[in-house]
Amino acid sequence: MSRVARLVQRVVESLHYGASTPFHGVYTLLFSWGHRNPSCGLALFCTLGLAVALAVPPLRAQTYTDLHDFDCTVEGCQPTYPEALAQGRDGNLYGTTEAGGTSGMGTVFKVTPSGAMTTLHNFSGTDGQNPSSGLTLGTDGNFYGTTELGGASNDGTIFRITPAGVLTTLHSFTGADGAIPRGAPVLGKNGSLYGTTCSQFGPWTAYSITQAGVFKLLSSSIPPCPFGPLELGGDGNFYGTSQVGGTTYQGTVFRLTPSGGVTVIYNFDYTHGAYLYSPVVQGNDGVLYGTTSGGGSAQAGVVFKLTTAGKLTVLHTFDANILTDGTTPFAGLVAASDGKYYGATSGGNNFGSAPSGTIFRIGSNGAYSVQNTFDSTHGALEEATPMQHTNGKIYGLTERGGAQTAGVLYDLDAGLPQFVALVTIFGGTGQKVQILGNGLTGTTAVHFGAASASFTVSSDTFITATIPADATTGFVTVTTPSGTLTSSRQFHVVPTISSIAPTSGPVGTLVTINGTGLLGATRVTFGGVVSSFTVVSSSKITATVPTGAVTGKVTVKTPGGSASSSATFTVTP
């Protein structure tokens, strides 16, 4: 599909979705298209670009490096929303381009942290077309992504690709199960991958797919239209965004359970932001952080934080004159190792003939600062969500700029701490956890909370560790020759119940609950009725059958999740 055709499609989508301020939806799309094209085919936005080009000369941040300029015919080009880079076990970065390559239908690439790029796959249509998703690292060491079009029905695909470039189409969408998947599927608590689709006129669906390719349609009632990938929350649910939809048709944040239950937790109202093309990210405070491309007091987008209970706070409103701090963020945020959040705007701080955009940092308290201003020559129009490599640097992709005006890959060295990244954030005692990092050769210790874990160093950038019996939910630390590295997210130790004894008795009976991961238990219930209890060890709890208890399962809740007994406890007279 040509870029012009895609613009028309997005304008139709904006009007079809029924935004209460439909002009803004069209405006956002035209604004984005206008500053993607240096030929300035849209006179309105070219005039705007020329006017703001009279701003002060560019002040390039010393820490910003243009690592690679894309060439459409060689390795693909124009990485756009919701594109996201993924770090592999080898320490390299993997991603997709929406266009270019040998067939002009997009590519999958590998790039070293220093910018040496290799094309792994050129899409040809039957195996997919226009991958704008970016990639997710699976527990098998392979990467998973989607294409918007192509496949058996030309409705898009889900694919797996090895680090060596061997691609397998796992699922071709048919329309009935969704179409035009935008974001990459993400790993869930159970090891399956979860994602959404954004077909032009619906249905807007959610799905799961195993790493072996077993597909399941979970819901056909997702708010329209989810562009960004889902975010796995610390509660085991997923959190997503929709471009429009909701009570005002100006976008939503919603919760998706692993079984397919959908709950809108916030409806945007333009005053507090509107039109979300980006995903949310959950901070270690449990709060969701994100951006909107429009709305806010200056009608230029906002940065927000949102509790999972639905309380929203606008942290920053972008400047309407698109000069001060950027405007129209299509990209989402990365939760960085300094406790701050980094993102990008597609417009603002203009140097040249078109809006170029910014990279910014923001704290959970709203403290905002511009980290870099794009100058078109070394990048422009970042709509892809940046990511942080375990080496501490922020990496990102722009859709325009560079020697071929086809986009660049960059890094931003803000002096942030190195860390380790967990491939999965849920697991039970005895399971292996995969850990990415740098300088891991010579590692002497791995801890889950205060518990020491056995581990195997596979390479300087990849180790595996076994969850110890006394592990608790919290951060994982890895002790290396150069220092101790802390995980970017907390690990959740999932509890299990193997047996209860006795299995029947009257109120007041002392029941022994055996299992794993029971340290830190916060709640025990008998048939849903709360009991008093004592945590004896990581594998044993004693609890008293409470007054009012009814026959049913015994359930234990810990910071890592909940577990229920397979046996029923029978309350006797």
Image (cartoon, rainbow, N blue to C red):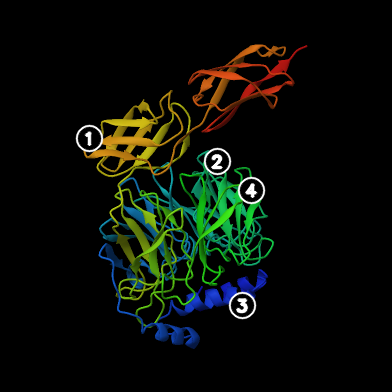
Q: Earlier in the sequence, mark 3 or mark 4?
A: 3
Q: Earlier in the sequence, mark 3 or mark 1?
A: 3
Q: Which residue is mark 3?
A: 23
Q: Earlier in the sequence, mark 4 or mark 1?
A: 4
Report the disc number at residue 218. Answer: 4
Tag 3 secondary structure: helix
Separation of disc 4 and disc 1 at Cα?
44 Å
Q: Nearer the viewer, residue 507 or 108?
A: 507
Disc 1 residue crowd, few under 14, some 14–19, many 20+, Cα 10 Å: few
Q: Earlier in the sequence, mark 2 or mark 1?
A: 2
Separation of disc 2 and disc 1 at Cα?
33 Å
Q: Is residue 17 above or below residue 466?
A: below
Report the disc number at residue 236. Answer: 2
Label 4 amino acid? Leu
Separation of disc 2 and disc 3 at Cα?
38 Å
Which numbered disc, 3 or 1, marks the residue closer to the eye? 3
Q: Please say if the residues under marks 4 and 1 sit with CB atoms less than 8 Å apart.
A: no
Which numbered disc, 4 or 1, marks the residue closer to the eye? 1
Disc 3 residue crowd, few under 14, some 14–19, many 20+, Cα 10 Å: few
Q: Residue at x 66, y 58 (%)?
A: 176
State the image coordinates of residue 450 (x, y, percent, origin top left): 38, 28
Which numbered disc, 3 or 4, marks the residue closer to the eye? 3
Which numbered disc, 2 or 4, marks the residue closer to the eye? 2
Label 1 amino acid? Gly
